Amino acid sequence: MTEIITKNTEYSISFNFKSDPTTPKDLTGHNILIQIRPYADSDKVLASWTDASPQITFIPISGSVTLSLSPVDTAALDFKAGVMDILAYNSIDGDRSDPIPVTVNYGVSRPA
């Protein structure tokens, strides 16, 4: 599934890490990193957020992470496509989501 981010509008995506299919993973002591790159093994980072970013809501005990971008944030995205993932990590452990294709567009309908 491709995530569509429309410029100048709000965008949100949530991730829920699990220890098994029904149990939330406690991520206490973990850091969060969400990046968008042109392709998975690219060295170029198009956008990046950490658990210290105001756009990230991180609830460690429930393994819940939400990236929320404002219209100002999405307007600043200066690329059209990429791949995103989320990494929860500490010095001894790490979990990563599957890569998620991302498309950034302007939308179609505009008032006159």
Image: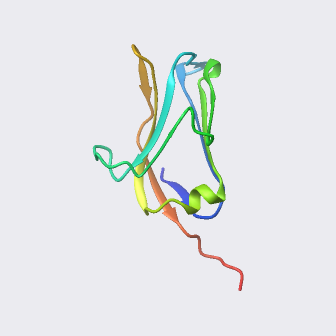
Q: Residue at x 32, y 44 (%)?
A: 40
Q: Is residue 1 visible?
A: yes
Q: Is residue 85 above or below residue 58?
A: below
Tell me residue 2's x, y (percent): 48, 53
Q: Quadrant of the C terminus?
A: bottom right
- Name the image quarter holding residue 16: top right
Q: Residue at x 65, y 54 (%)?
A: 70
Q: Is 1 left, or right, of 45 in this rendering?
A: right
Q: Nearer the viewer, residue 94 or 71?
A: 71
Q: Residue at x 51, y 30 (%)?
A: 32
Tell me residue 20's x, y (percent): 52, 18
Q: Nearer the viewer, residue 23 or 89?
A: 89
Which residue is outermost to the right? 111
Q: How many marks?
A: 0
Q: Residue at x 59, y 20 (%)?
A: 22
Image color mode? rainbow
Q: Is residue 21 above or below residue 36?
A: above
Q: Nearer the viewer, residue 1 or 112?
A: 112
Q: Is residue 60 above or below residue 54?
A: above
Q: Is 36 left, or right, of 74 in this rendering?
A: left
Q: Is 88 left, or right, of 106 in this rendering?
A: left
Q: Is residue 20 visible?
A: no
Tell me residue 1's x, y (percent): 48, 50
- Name the image quarter holding residue 56: top right
Which residue is outermost to the top? 92
